[in-house]
């Protein structure tokens, strides 16, 4: 169906141009209500569309029912045969008697036509939202503070780059530095507040937001999640997302009768053409690229060209209609429903969204975490609090895990045929791999790599592999040679099969080219079986085609919805107070290996920074000033020598240089003042 | 499974011709005079990178076997600097030389050793490496080694006389294969070329460049003064699509293969190939996966075996399996068409097994018939305009698997077009069709042969219109013309006359329509969609959604589905969403936090976000706990890549996605 839908979209896209021009003309005359206008247009289109698509789907349903029945028989039979194990993943299509979809369709039909004119435009929001909104307002009033809002353009990394800020740092000192990079101390807050106070007061939060929404020409496209199987309500899925400021937009503006009739006529014509064009391909006959992961990132570009957003939406609506005919209640066996449904696809991500997100600097309030009694909990406190709380959905999550356990033999079978396994899906998959290890791999040679750990390196991985797993007494030190040693060792006759379990193959340190190269080389070996998990949403970008072919992955949806406790414990979370121990100890470690003169230079720099910690305008110590002071202290004799020392510091990430606006190099120690003074104190002690 | 050997043979064969040419060129390269530059064979391999490993491996093997023992295959990943490259090159050239000189069999993974790791190599393979260790990996060492090797070769008693006779040239070339030239550092490449051209007088070095884009890439990488040292020769490897066509013909359609891909699965695999990677290796791997899952998942696959094993297998069927077979959709459909009595007798297991034994072998013959019919039809359409069944046989095959082809427009149109062919064209077309099916020995070939004979035997001359008939006609025309009173009636009468004349076919036309009808009938009998065969589930695998989920991963959509609607995974009643955008307090914390963040713009105020979270989850917990829950969720979202920290504004995070995802 997807492919048909796509074709339809294109066709109507080209045909709809004239109605579009008409609309734009109208837009110029009735500027204020153009959002509503397009909504009204959609109404007409939808009414037609719905009827058409219902009549289109009706003959199909019997086939669907048949298919379902077939699959049920297959499954019930399979359970009895010795060679197969019940597979939650393969075929448990929701079972539905064929009469039911038809009934649902007719119901939908009437409901749709009834609702058509009334619901559209008036937003229906859940109770929770209202409740939340009122709560928000209360909070806002409590902390009422007419502080101005001005958000500069945030430098959002393009979603194409999967790296997070902390990825490239070496393990030894990385965390310390990372901790220091965030100026989250109280002082900065104050500064920000004092700076912002000087500007004019903004409109109230809700107002400003609704304004920014209504500025965009058409209502936001339906949430892609709107395709949940909840038939009659689907109309609500299309209403604009924001609850704020709906009142003004909800007033229906009457489109001139003539225009409406014209549009109706045109759309009906288009519809007929579409029906003629779209062939009766099966739903699942989608070109593989359409729901491949890469497509996600291509989607914006594609849709950019597809300039007719309206028709786009209509088509999505149609798809929604068709998928929704499968009643959700009948779903048996977990995992079945979502996995069967890869068409919850990113196709609905429109390029427009990207630009609306980036053009309008969505104003945010100036509240800071300092309002809380304890802005940042310590890691230990956080864990204690979370542990004390019973987890929700414990039974369901356990069921998810056991369902995955059933798959273990299949994974091992696939692995033994030269494939490698990649698990994806929400939730920590550590437990899954761990269970696999405990249940099946205890007796076999295996190695676990914790990719989420910030200090994994390819060399370390290979060394461990050679020394611990393969018992090579004196492994070579060069990466290439190590790889070859592994290859040679495993190519020898009688070598054991090696199971490589990699948690978070897309972890911060695992994203490096070198690491993936090593893993791909290893995965290629016939005796190495790789079972890995991927967590980051952009993880497929790590691999190019060659690597993917080397990995030869089979993808398994292993959604567990378990908390990423272990994985996030290494991340410097935004809301967790950094314990300084690690940063400090790594700093000391490096410091010990410095020459006395170099130590002197560093202490000089650090002291200067501590002294001027309260100075808001302090941006770092200029290089010339540092040179002067160092010379005075007989630490260096020439600028060249100083630069050599600084290069070493920089290599160890002890300092950071920045060019100020007038081109002067300025040096800072990337740690918080408190940390530095603690460090200085400990230096003086020793 | 026999596929692996099948596919391997086939890959070897595919590159036979181009390798043959290259080897000839390289063998002759020794005699090229020295100032002509380094003889370089540029092998244009195409963009199907994943296949190249196999291509270059077999190239190296062949070079070792036929041209010279001195072959080095360089890869960009291990050649970051000139030093490393020279070392890798010299190591491989000398190592290989030694092994053959010692008369040992060559293995593709001859250990290449670095200075640093000699110790462990000593333990591993002391015999070979102890010799290697003496020579440092430099060009002069290579020269010395080569000269020594030449001497030993020149002395008799080494190698079989036949082999020596074949590799006549006294100086065997040193071949350096650069895999994936574009990936090398231009500097390294240039320096290496210059260095090697310096040694050209002493060493007969020749290069093989593996280029995946186009030949001009060499000139883009090398400036003129460097490329002048090379004498380039271009070789084109087989197109990946050709390989695929061969592969499908030899493996997928081979009669010895009991397993078949269904139409939709095949289409998916072809789409992955055509729109994704062009990699035959990946296609093979996907095919292997299909086969694996067929045998793992489908209980009916018990009958998917060679015909001679069938009896045994059917004997072994348990009661449950028989019931399963009886429940197969195709079997049920077949049974429903049978008479009541017959159906009743088949309820008995023993009778049913016999019936299975009777029906199952037909699956293979039916596939053969389908293929013969299709090949014939494809040959017929090949010369018609518009490529009705596609330009490749695989397209026609896929179409026949997906649909009942004789009912399709393409089929009807083919016969319409065929019925317009002139005699020469028809003869040629029939000859083609005959050629296509002649190997099969089916009835269709005899039909075609007799048809061809009939067309050829047809008397050339147009049947003479008898004299009296023509005079009669003339009179008739004159009469009608006279009768015409108005212009319109004249036109009508003329038209009707013309139609009457057209309706009378000449003998060729009658023969043609008769032939085509006959052909149509035969083809309709042969081309039957596999899903109509009873027991087709035993041999046909068509679970396309499973294949897609496994081969084309969509990790992001699974994450987003779980976040937006966790009830789909949890299967709980408490989190069912009426509206996709709504939030329920019972949902997992992460989902709530995620959904709240969807409502924000580029920057998200952490404090407000937390307040919103608190409002949703209610006051069940104290502030600290809610804060902890929220903090954990934010960390998770950061880990998943939805947000990142930002310094733009205090206590804000930046969103990394846009829209409703």
Image (cartoon, coloured by chain):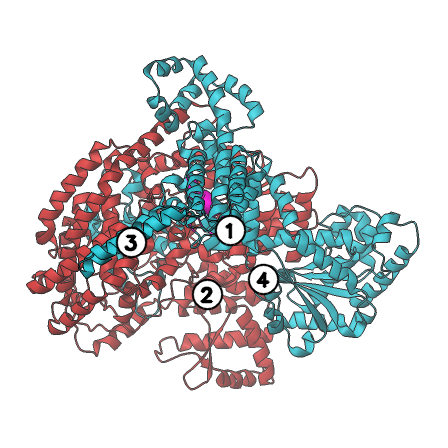
Chain colours: A red, B cyan
The picture quadrant where one finds residue A356 is bottom left
Asked if both marks, 2 and 1, belong to the same chain, the answer given is no
Query: Which region of the structure is painted magenta?
Result: B388-401
> Counting other residues with Cα less than 10 Å from the Cα at mark 3, is it few (<14), some (14-19), or many (20 or more)?
some
Picture quarter with the C terminus of chain A: bottom right
A409 over B280 or under it: above or below: above
Asked if residue A646 shows in the view, the reply is: yes
- Mark 1 highlights which residue? B424
Q: Nearer the viewer, mark 2 or mark 4?
A: 4
Q: Nearer the viewer, mark 2 or mark 3?
A: 3
Q: Along the polypeptide, which appears first: circle 4 or circle 1?
A: 4
Disc 2/disc 1 C-alpha distance (Å): 83 Å
CB atoms of marks 2 and 1 within 8 Å: no
- Mark 2 highlights which residue? A177
Disc 2/disc 4 C-alpha distance (Å): 43 Å
Any mark on residue B212, and which?
A: 4
> What residue lies at 58% left-to-right and 76% top-to-bottom?
A645
Q: Chain of mark 1?
A: B
Q: Is residue B203 left or right of residue B642?
A: right
Horizontal and vertical percent position of residue B298: 45, 30
Q: Along the polypeptide, which appears first: circle 4 or circle 3?
A: 4
Q: Chain of mark 3?
A: B
Asked if both marks, 2 and 3, belong to the same chain, the answer given is no
Disc 4/disc 1 C-alpha distance (Å): 44 Å
């Amino acid at each position: 169906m997807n492919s048909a839908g796509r074709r339809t979209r294109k066709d109507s896209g080209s045909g709809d141009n004239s109605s579009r021009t008409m609309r734009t003309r109208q837009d110029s005359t009735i500027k204020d209500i153009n959002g509503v206008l397009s909504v009204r247009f959609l109404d007409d289109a939808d009414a037609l569309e719905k009827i058409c698509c219902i009549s289109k789907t009706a003959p199909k349903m019997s086939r669907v029912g048949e298919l379902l029945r077939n699959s049920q028989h297959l499954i019930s039979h399979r359970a009895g045969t010795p060679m197969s194990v019940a597979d939650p993943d393969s075929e448990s299509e929701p079972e539905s008697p064929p009469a039911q979809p038809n009934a649902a369709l007719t119901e939908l039909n009437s409901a749709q036509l009834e609702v058509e004119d009334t619901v559209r435009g008036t937003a229906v929001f859940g109770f929770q939202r209202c409740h939340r909104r009122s709560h928000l307002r209360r909070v806002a009033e409590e902390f009422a503070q007419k502080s101005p809002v001005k958000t500069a353009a945030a430098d959002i990394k393009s979603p194409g780059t999967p790296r997070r800020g902390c990825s490239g740092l070496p393990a030894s000192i990385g965390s310390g530095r990372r901790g220091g990079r965030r100026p989250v101390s109280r002082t900065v807050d104050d500064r920000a507040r004092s700076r912002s106070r000087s500007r004019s007061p903004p409109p109230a939060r809700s107002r400003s937001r609704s304004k920014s929404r209504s500025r965009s020409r058409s209502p936001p496209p339906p949430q892609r999640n709107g395709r949940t199987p909840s038939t009659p309500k689907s109309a609500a899925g299309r209403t604009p997302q924001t609850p704020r400021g709906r009142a003004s937009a909800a007033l229906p503006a009457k489109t001139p009768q003539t225009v409406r009739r014209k549009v109706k006529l045109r759309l009906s014509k288009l519809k007929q053409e579409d029906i003629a064009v779209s062939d009766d391909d099966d739903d699942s006959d989608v070109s593989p690229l359409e729901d491949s992961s890469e497509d996600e990132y291509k989607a914006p570009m594609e849709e950019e060209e597809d300039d007719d957003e309206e028709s786009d939406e209509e088509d999505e609506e149609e798809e929604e209609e068709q998928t929704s005919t499968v009643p959700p209640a009948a779903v048996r066996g977990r995992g079945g429903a979502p996995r069967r449904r890869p068409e919850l696809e990113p196709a609905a991500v429109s390029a427009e969204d990207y630009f609306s997100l980036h053009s309008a600097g969505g104003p945010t309030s100036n509240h800071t975490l300092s309002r809380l009694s304890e802005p940042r909990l310590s890691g230990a406190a956080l864990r204690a609090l979370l542990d004390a709380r019973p987890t929700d959905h414990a039974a369901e999550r356990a069921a998810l895990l056991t369902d995955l356990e059933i798959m273990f033999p299949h994974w091992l079978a696939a692995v033994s045929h030269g494939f490698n396994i990649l698990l994806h899906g929400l939730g920590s998959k550590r437990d899954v791999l761990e269970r696999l290890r405990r249940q099946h791999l205890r007796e076999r040679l295996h190695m676990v790599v914790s990719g989420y750990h910030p200090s994994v390196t390819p060399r370390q991985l290979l060394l461990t592999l050679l020394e611990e797993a393969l018992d090579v007494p004196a492994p070579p030190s060069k990466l290439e040679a190590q790889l070859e040693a592994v290859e040679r060792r495993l190519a020898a006759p009688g070598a054991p099969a090696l199971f490589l379990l990699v948690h978070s193959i897309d972890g911060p340190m695992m994203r490096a080219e070198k690491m993936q190269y090593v893993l791909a080389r290893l995965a290629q070996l016939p005796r190495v079986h790789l079972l890995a998990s991927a967590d980051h949403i952009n993880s497929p970008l790590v691999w190019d085609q060659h690597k993917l072919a080397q990995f030869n992955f089979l993808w398994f949806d292993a959604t567990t919805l378990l908390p990423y406790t272990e994985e996030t414990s290494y991340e410097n979370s935004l809301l967790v107070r950094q314990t300084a121990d690690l940063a400090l100890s790594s700093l000391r470690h490096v410091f010990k290996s410095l020459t006395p003169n170099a130590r002197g230079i560093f202490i000089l720099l650090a002291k200067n920074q501590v002294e001027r910690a309260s100075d808001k305008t302090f941006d770092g110590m200029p290089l010339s000033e540092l040179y002067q002071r160092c010379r005075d202290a007989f630490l260096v004799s020439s600028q060249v020598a100083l630069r050599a020392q600084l290069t070493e510091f920089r290599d160890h990430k002890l300092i950071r240089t920045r060019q100020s606006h007038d081109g002067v190099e300025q040096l800072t120690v990337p740690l918080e003042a408190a940390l530095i003074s603690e460090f200085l104190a400990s230096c003086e002690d020793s | 499974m026999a596929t692996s050997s099948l596919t391997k043979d086939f890959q070897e064969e595919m590159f036979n011709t181009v390798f043959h040419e290259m080897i000839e060129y390289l063998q002759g390269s020794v005699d090229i005079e020295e100032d002509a530059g380094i003889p370089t064979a540029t092998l244009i391999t195409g963009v199907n990178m994943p296949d190249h490993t196999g291509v270059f491996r077999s190239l190296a093997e062949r070079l070792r076997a036929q041209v010279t023992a001195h072959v080095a295959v360089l890869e960009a990943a291990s050649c970051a600097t000139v030093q490393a490259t020279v070392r890798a090159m010299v190591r491989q050239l000398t190592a290989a030389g030694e092994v053959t000189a010692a008369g040992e069999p060559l293995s593709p993974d001859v250990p290449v050793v670095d200075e640093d790791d000699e110790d462990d190599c000593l333990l591993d393979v002391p015999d070979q490496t102890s010799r290697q260790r003496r020579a440092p990996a430099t060009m002069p060492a290579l020269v010395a080694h080569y000269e020594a090797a030449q001497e030993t070769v020149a002395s008799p008693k080494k190698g079989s006389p036949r082999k020596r006779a074949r590799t006549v040239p006294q100086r065997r070339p040193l071949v350096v294969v650069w895999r994936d030239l574009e990936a090398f550092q231009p500097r390294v490449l240039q320096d290496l070329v210059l260095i090697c051209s310096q040694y050209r007088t002493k060493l007969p070095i020749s290069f093989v460049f593996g280029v995946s884009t186009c030949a001009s890439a060499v000139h883009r990488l090398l400036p003129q003064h460097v490329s002048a040292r090379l004498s380039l020769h271009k070789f084109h490897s087989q197109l990946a699509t050709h390989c695929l066509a061969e592969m499908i013909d030899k493996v997928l359609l081979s009669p010895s293969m009991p397993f078949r891909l269904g139409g939709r699965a095949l289409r998916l695999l072809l789409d992955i190939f055509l729109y994704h990677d062009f990699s035959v290796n990946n296609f093979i791997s996907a095919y292997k996966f299909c086969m694996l899952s067929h045998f793992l998942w489908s209980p009916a696959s018990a009958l998917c075996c060679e015909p001679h094993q069938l009896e045994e297998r059917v004997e072994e069927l348990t009661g449950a399996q028989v019931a399963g077979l009886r429940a197969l959709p195709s079997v049920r459909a077949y049974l429903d068409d049978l008479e009541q009595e017959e159906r009743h007798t088949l309820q008995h297991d023993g009778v049913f097994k016999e019936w299975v034994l009777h029906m199952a072998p037909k699956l293979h013959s039916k596939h053969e018939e389908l293929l013969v019919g299709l090949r014939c039809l494809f040959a017929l359409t090949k010369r018609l305009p518009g490529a009705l069944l596609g330009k490749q046989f695989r397209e026609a095959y896929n179409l026949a698997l997906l649909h009942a082809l004789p009912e399709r427009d393409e089929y009807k149109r083919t016969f319409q077009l065929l019925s317009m062919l002139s005699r020469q064209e028809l003869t040629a077309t029939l000859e083609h069709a005959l050629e296509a099916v002649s190997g099969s020995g089916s009835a269709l070939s005899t039909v075609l042969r007799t048809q061809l004979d009939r067309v050829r035997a047809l008397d050339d001359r147009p049947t003479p219109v008898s004299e009296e008939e023509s005079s009669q006609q003339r009179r008739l025309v004159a009469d009608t013309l006279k009768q015409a009173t108005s212009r319109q009636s004249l036109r009508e009468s003329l038209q009707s006359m013309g139609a009457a004349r057209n309706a009378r076919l000449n003998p060729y036309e009658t023969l043609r329509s008769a032939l085509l009808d006959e052909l149509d009938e035969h083809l309709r009998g042969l081309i039957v969609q596999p899903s109509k065969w009873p027991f087709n589930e035993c041999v046909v695998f068509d679970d396309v959604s499973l294949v897609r989920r496994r081969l084309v991963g969509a990790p992001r959509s699974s994450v987003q589905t779980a976040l937006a609607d966790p009830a789909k995974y949890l299967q709980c009643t408490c989190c069912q969403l009426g509206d996709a955008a709504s939030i329920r307090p019972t949902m997992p914390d992460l989902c709530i936090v995620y959904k709240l963040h969807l409502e924000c713009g580029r920057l998200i105020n952490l404090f407000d976000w937390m307040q919103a979270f608190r409002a949703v989850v209610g006051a069940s917990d104290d502030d600290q706990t809610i804060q902890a829950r929220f903090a954990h969720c934010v960390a998770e979202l950061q880990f998943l890549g939805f947000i990142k920290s930002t310094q733009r504004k205090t206590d804000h995070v930046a969103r990394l996605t846009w829209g409703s995802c």
